[in-house]
Image: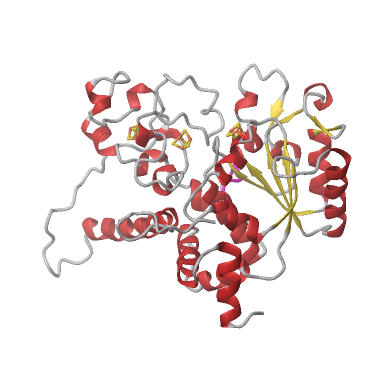
Amino acid sequence: MYDDTEISREIANRFNLDRRDFLKFCAAMAATMGLPKGADAQIAQAMTAKERPSVIWLHFQECTGCTESMLRAEHPTIEKLILEIISLDYHETLFAAAGHQVEAAREAAMKKNWGKYVLVIEGAIPVKDNGIYCKVGGKTALQLTKECAEGAAAVIAIGSCASWGGMPSTPPNPTGSTGVPEILVGKPVVTIPGCPPNPYNFLSTVVHFLTFGALPAVDDKGRPKFAYSRLIHENCERRAHFDAGRFALEFGDEGHRKGYCLYKLGCKGPETYANCPAILFNDVGSGSWPVGTGHPCIGCTEKGIGFAKPIHALAELQNQRPPVGYPRVVEEQGAGASIGAIATVAAVGGLAIGAGAKLVGNLGKSEDGQDSGKQG
Ligand code: FSX
Ligand code: SF4
Ligand code: F3S
């Protein structure tokens, strides 16, 4: 354990943050994951712990976008946050060493941390013809997945490729690409789909594991509920246009230029679960997500939608009907709980989680939205 001064020094050294910003970050993480009061202090303690868990990170059929999106984030430098809370003992993109040397490092790290290390897999696993279409160090992705999962305390499939096959599994899927859960049947695997996934969802998952020694609650596809419980369409800034029937019909037409809803251009937001509009990408402020930049969501987090359903095909609407009754604009005092009041409480609850996500996104920027100059 550290004393207070040591903690501040540790935070400055490790994360290039002052203590206040670091604690704000921990509070935002706790809010993002919907954790109860007091969890922020537990997170702070876990993130500054002297011992860091060993992480083995495998790359298979993919574009390395998952790793890239982590390394290119800016405020605060997420790669610093991640790389300073874990001990990355094997990562093909980031390692200077190569060949037998690096394979020996992986085996040594696994042996030393047997039963305790975290296995992260990026990329799909081809299974056709015994998996010969993807090999690293002479072993197939299939063999490596099984071998490395054996001694892992937790397995995280990062990106859509590792989660369910993603882009490499696009029909006709010539190499038989599939996701980690299909290979490690019976072993819990947390999936963080997205092509690339939002790095904060990965960071939050790792922080949850560090803090509580367990992975976060997941849905039936293994996705953390804190990030994948809501349809994109529920949080989209263009939703009012959808409800009012104002649509862009062609790229560059008047509706598109005015920021109307992209549903008729094939937006898959109504059938895709993810927190993209709430958490945004690249920490550059509002609008920094696919729909925000004028492109329909392609459903990259959703098996059977992303890379499977044609881009121009219309999304299947799920729960987009307006309620039958609306509250009055001004409630009378003492009228008791009304639909309006209940809706307000629900909205505030939703906002609290959204605000946490926003805070994470805005950390490192000053009040007026300008860069506070903190870089890793
Ligand atoms: Fe690429 Fe990752 Fe897409 Fe796949 O992200 S961004 S093809 S999900 O595995 O590198
Ligand atoms: Fe937003 Fe797409 Fe839904 Fe339109 S269809 S409101 S652009 S998510
Ligand atoms: Fe992917 Fe759609 Fe989000 S394309 S990044 S799920 S907005």
| Among the 4 quarters of the image, the one containing residue 341 | bottom left
The percent position of residue 104, horizontal first and vertical second, equals 88, 46
> Where is the C terminus found, in terms of image quarters?
bottom right
Residue at 52% of width from left, 51% of height from top?
200
User: Which of the two residues, 373 or 2, is positioned nearer the viewer here?
Assistant: 373
Point out the quarter of the image occupied by ligand 1.
top right
Any part of residue 84 in sight: yes
**Residue 341 drawn above or below residue 63:** below
Residue at 38% of width from left, 31% of height from top?
317
Rendering colour mode: secondary structure
**Residue 3 drawn above or below residue 204:** below
User: Which of the two residues, 64 or 96, is positioned nearer the viewer here?
Assistant: 96
> Where is the N terminus found, in terms of image quarters?
bottom right
The percent position of residue 288, horizontal first and vertical second, equals 39, 40
The percent position of residue 302, horizontal first and vertical second, equals 53, 34
| Among the 4 quarters of the image, the one containing residue 12 | bottom right
Residue at 45% of width from left, 71% of height from top?
20
User: Which of the two residues, 40 or 23, is positioned nearer the viewer here?
Assistant: 23
Residue range of the region highlighted in magenta in the rendering: 220-224
Magenta stretch secondary structure, dominant: loop
Check residue 336 for magenta coloring. no
**Residue 339 drawn above or below residue 196:** below
Any part of residue 216 in sight: no
Check residue 221 for magenta coloring. yes
The percent position of residue 35, horizontal first and vertical second, equals 50, 64
| Among the 4 quarters of the image, the one containing residue 163 | top right
Residue at 27% of width from left, 55% of height from top?
343
